[in-house]
């Protein structure tokens, strides 16, 4: 349990967020994320990437506790995030519960709430312990068209505190497609020096949102991410990342965008998913 606590609280990314492990046992875990302006969107709203991050951390904590140290390295093979409400200037807690343990897979449910009990996000994770299995060579992303048009909104995305703290930059955001890059900053890493899964989720979430805005065009609209589904194909690399987003469908105020997150050096995909985004016009 001391190793698990060290992984949570000494990983630069989770330490930057301020995540604390309050409890962990064979049945589940509780984590606490105090409010911080550094983790927010405008208006003191907790960034969705933070809620997803604490869910990913909670899932891994439970898996590491029940699978044991020899099962590592662990990674979140699949994750479903449903965003239920915004946390506005509020501390949040994540209660992670073991749903089922397999030989190398753990199924974990995580409920993220404010300390007053308001539901913020409901998350299900499938966490894999790789153990002695050799690392797989993931497929290489086809990339995109290579255009570099950040549009009207792109240059301003980095002014959002949580996004700016990740070093995320918009290279392209036009015609229903988006390309974002995230450097290998210390504050984006886990204890082993690779990109933390939470930072990967933040990049994927943001890229899906930007692809949706690239489809709708800018305006004084209200927007949010109701949900996202994703897979992390293995422990994220020690490298800068690039994310490619493409809006594949929109229906009035609902937008579906597919995203690939790849190593910026060799193009190998480390995560992929679909972001459901809502823009109220």
Image (tube, grey):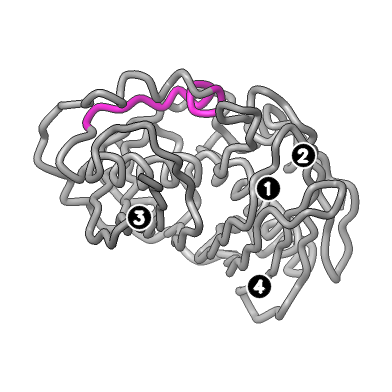
What percent of the width, then of the height, locates residue 156? 37, 20
Contact (Cβ within 8 Å) of mark 1 with mark 2: yes
Tell me if mark 4 has few (under 14), some (14-19) or many (20+) residues whose alpha carbon lies within 10 angstroms of its own. Answer: many
Quarter of the image where the C terminus is located: top left
Bounds of the magenta segment: 161-172
How far is the residue under mark 1 from the one under mark 2? 8 Å
Give the label, 3 or 2, closer to the camera. Answer: 3
Q: Which residue is drawn at 64% across and 45% down?
A: 86
Locate residue 15: give its quadrant: top right
Circle 1 SS class: helix
In the picture of the structure, the residue carrying the numbered disc 2 is 33
User: Does 167 lie within the magenta span?
Assistant: yes
Q: Nearer the viewer, residue 118 or 185?
A: 118
Q: Could you tell which of marks 1 and 2 lies nearer the N-terminus?
A: 2
Q: Which residue is drawn at 61% across and 74% down?
A: 105
Q: Name the residue under label 4.
A: 106
Could you say which is closer to the camera, residue 232 or residue 214?
A: 214
Question: Observer-nearest residue: 218 or 94?
Answer: 218
Q: Classify 157 as above or below 57.
A: above
Q: Which label's residue is closer to the chain start, 3 or 2?
A: 2
According to the picture, the residue beneath numbered tag 1 turns out to be 54
Crowd tier of the residue under label 2, counting other residues whose Cα lies within 10 Å: few below 14, some 14–19, many 20 or above: many
Q: Are marks 4 and 3 in contact (CB under 8 Å)?
A: no
Is 30 positioned to the left or the right of 255 in the image?
right
Q: How crowded is mark 3: few (under 14 residues within 10 Å), some or many (20 or more)?
A: few
Q: Which of marks 4 and 3 is nearer the N terminus?
A: 4
First-in-chain label (4 vs 1) = 1
Q: Can residue 48 be seen in this view?
A: yes
């Amino acid at each position: 349990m001391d190793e698990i606590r060290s992984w949570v609280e000494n990983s630069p990314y989770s330490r930057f967020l301020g995540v604390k492990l309050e409890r962990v046992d064979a049945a589940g875990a509780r984590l606490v994320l105090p409010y911080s302006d550094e983790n927010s969107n405008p208006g003191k709203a907790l960034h969705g990437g933070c809620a997803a991050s604490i869910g990913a951390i909670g899932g891994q904590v439970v898996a590491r506790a029940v699978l044991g140290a020899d099962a590592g390295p662990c990674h979140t093979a699949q994750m479903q995030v449903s965003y239920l409400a915004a946390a506005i200037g509020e501390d949040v807690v994540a209660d992670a519960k073991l749903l089922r343990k397999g030989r190398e897979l753990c199924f974990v449910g995580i409920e993220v709430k404010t300390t007053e009990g308001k539901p913020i996000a409901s998350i299900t994770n499938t966490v894999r312990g790789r153990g002695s299995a050799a690392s797989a060579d993931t497929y290489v992303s086809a990339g995109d068209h290579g255009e570099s048009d950040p549009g009207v909104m792109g240059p301003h995305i980095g002014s959002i505190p949580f996004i700016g703290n990740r070093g995320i930059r918009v290279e392209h955001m036009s015609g229903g497609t988006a390309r974002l890059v995230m450097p290998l900053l210390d504050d984006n890493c886990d204890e082993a020096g690779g990109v933390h899964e939470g930072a990967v989720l933040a990049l994927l979430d943001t890229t899906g949102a930007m692809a949706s805005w690239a489809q709708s065009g800018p305006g004084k609209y209200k927007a949010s991410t109701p949900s996202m589904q994703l897979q992390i194909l293995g422990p994220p690399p020690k490298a800068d990342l690039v994310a490619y987003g493409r809006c594949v469908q929109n229906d009035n105020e609902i937008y579906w965008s597919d995203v690939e997150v790849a190593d910026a050096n060799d193009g190998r995909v480390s995560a992929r998913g679909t972001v459901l985004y809502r823009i109220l016009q």
